Amino acid sequence: MREMISFDQFLTSLPGGNFKGQQQLTAFRVSEPKSTFVPPNLSVVVSSEDPLITLVSARGATGKSRLAEEVSAIKQVPLWLLNEDKAVSGDALRTRLGDYTDTKDGLERLSSDPNSFLLIDALDEARMRVSGASWYEYVQTLFSASAQTHSLVLFGRERVLEDIWAKSDNRVNWFEISHFDEEQRARYIDLYVGNARTEEREAYAATRDTVLAALSGAVDGHKEADSFIGYAPVLYAVALLLSKGNLINIRASFESEVGNAQRIRVLGNIIEELLKREQEKTTKLAEELETPAGKMYRPEEQVDWLAHHLLGADEPDLSWCEDESLQSRYCRNIREFLDDHPFRSEGEWANPVFSAYIAAERFDKVKTVPLQEVGAATGLLFEFLAAKHSEMLIDESQLAALHTSLVASERHDVEVSVSLAGGEPLVGPGDGEGVDTVTGELSLWESSGSRWESSDNRKSIAVDVVLGNSGVFDLKGPLASLSLEFPNTVTVNPSSGSATFGPDCFIRCRHLQISGESMQISIGKNTVGGHHQKDGVTQSGGPDVTFELTGGLLGNAQLVGEPTVDSFELLVPPTVRMGHPWFRHQKELGLREAEPNERAVRFVKMMMNLMRNHGHKGTPAVFDKKLEGRQSVKGHEFKHVIARLRADGVVAYEGPMIHLLSPWTERRFSGKERAGVQTFEHMREVWRPVVDAIQEVLDD
């Protein structure tokens, strides 16, 4: 279990501060303190005795930007908001520091003064916006600026920070903003409720605790319950519920929920209670319009109005009001309530909980761009949908929104996976042009402590993805935590002009077509030179990004960032010749006829390649859907193979995890060919019984 530190301890780990400039720029300035800040706890991801850079990560809408503002105000150092500054390039840091200090040596002052440091927030937004070349040059200036003293504190999502960490010299402190604990949760809610319940303090506290108990599911010792109810957007929704209304009724309605493990359903109930409260506000309007109050502004209608105004969906169906003149009057008068709706804030969403709920309720009706934005803000979009649907029929844009929401959920105790299969690509002539649908599964697992085996912590949605063009899969979402097998062409069209693949990306297809100017490889934080580290133990592992292309790589995108040959591999047929710089990563794609039991061998190699010690001290393990998605044994065949390996004592299957058992743990090998490490060829005779057993299952 990771060490936890307080906000004050975090401040102590930073330099002295007091780096004041002559000019306070809009996106580069010292922040003002705010009264609504609740200091969080932070977990220690990586610790260094002499750090040069501090990284602070958090899942979506956890409050990293708010924490950055508070640090800026307390330490009196500038905060650079990259989401408000479009200049992200090789000379951006020097230019901004020169403007801030009104000198030519602002960068030199930052780099040499042991007390001065700079906070940089919204690295995620910046990376998505700029080209790969500009981002690479920008990151290099950060490393240069922090080469002498501890001068930078960087805030962002885990994926962008882990790439920076992997390319650093390990003189880094990395902290992750944790969920609010029990005391902090109550303080957060009380802060937003304010003085509205001062005279009802005892009844208010009892009601607050009842609602929180219902959200937790009253499950003791489950970390995922704490992370859910300690999530700031969830607490905001609770505070809004408690700020007004009948406390006795609220408490009574949620007492029956205590003990129910469906926390996301209880959150939905909170939102529904808020919608019902809003309907009650229109009683006077109903009297003026001589309309039954129960018909107008119902919760379902409010969802439709919000989806229309903020997500681009169609206007609500007002068939309850048949009189056109009355309907027109109603629409004019109801606008006042919509503009003042608690789910909104000056034309935007007041909270990611509300946007995720509305988008999930009207998932098939909202526009593509706002749906993507909702997914990027929080993992709750995926969780709301997973609570309602075990299977969904979606298009490529909706898949991208769900995948984006999964990525927003990520933190150190969460694993996500998107596994998609449309058929195996062939070498040579084939018929992949006729494929119209891809099947797959999106999954999220939360650790309940030191192990990952409980299937109760798993949320998943099986999907059928309808393609916009037959025989072409257009990847519109994240290119990470992805396993994709497709028989024909996969296209990537990045909006920023640069495609970022990884970490943990596997694409097997005929042709991969990358549009835009550049592509780059993102390295996972558990990867060091192609080897994975966990609990201080280096484990042989595969690259962060693998392309297996039976045809070839199409497009004019340039590879930037100089990825290592261990982090990125490109497997193509021996007849394909790649130019610079691709040839460094080129390997020969094994043909089906090369080995009679190729599928069984590939299964064993991939299992060895993917197995890690996922947050526990036990045996190496791999998530089932990840292993299934990375090789050709799928569906019922996959289940039968795992059952045979369990029966033979090779693996244990606990929840979503496939564990390698002793004595096979001592017989591990590298799933990829590497100098100086044992490969399958070295261990072929040892693993032959396992390969033969798998082949027997496949032959049945």
Image (cartoon, grey):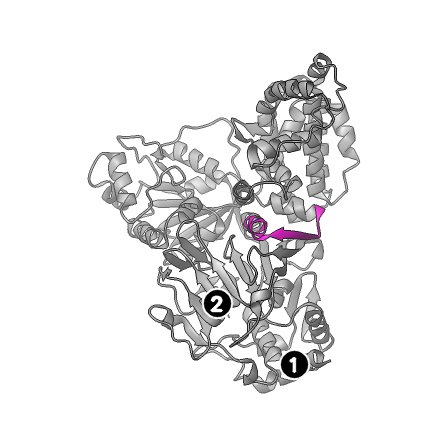
Q: Is residue 96 above or below residue 251?
A: below
Specify whether residue 657 is painted magenta.
no
Quarter of the image with the C terminus in it: bottom right
Q: Amino acid at mark 1?
A: Val
Q: Quadrant of residue 663?
A: bottom right
Q: Quadrant of residue 361?
A: top right
Is 490 left, or right, of 216 in this rendering? left
Q: Residue at x 48, y 40 (%)?
A: 64
* Any part of residue 450 in sight: no
Q: Which SS class for mark 1?
A: helix
Real-space Cα distance between discs 1 and 2? 33 Å
Q: Position of residue 342 (x, y in %)?
A: 60, 26
Label 1: few (<14), some or many (≥20) within 10 Å? some
| Residue 690 disc label | 1
State the residue lying farthest toward the top: 288
Q: Is residue 638 above or below residue 298?
A: below
Label 2: few (<14), some or many (≥20) within 10 Å? many
**Tag 2 residue:** 511
> Which residues, given as a range, are shown in magenta?
388-404
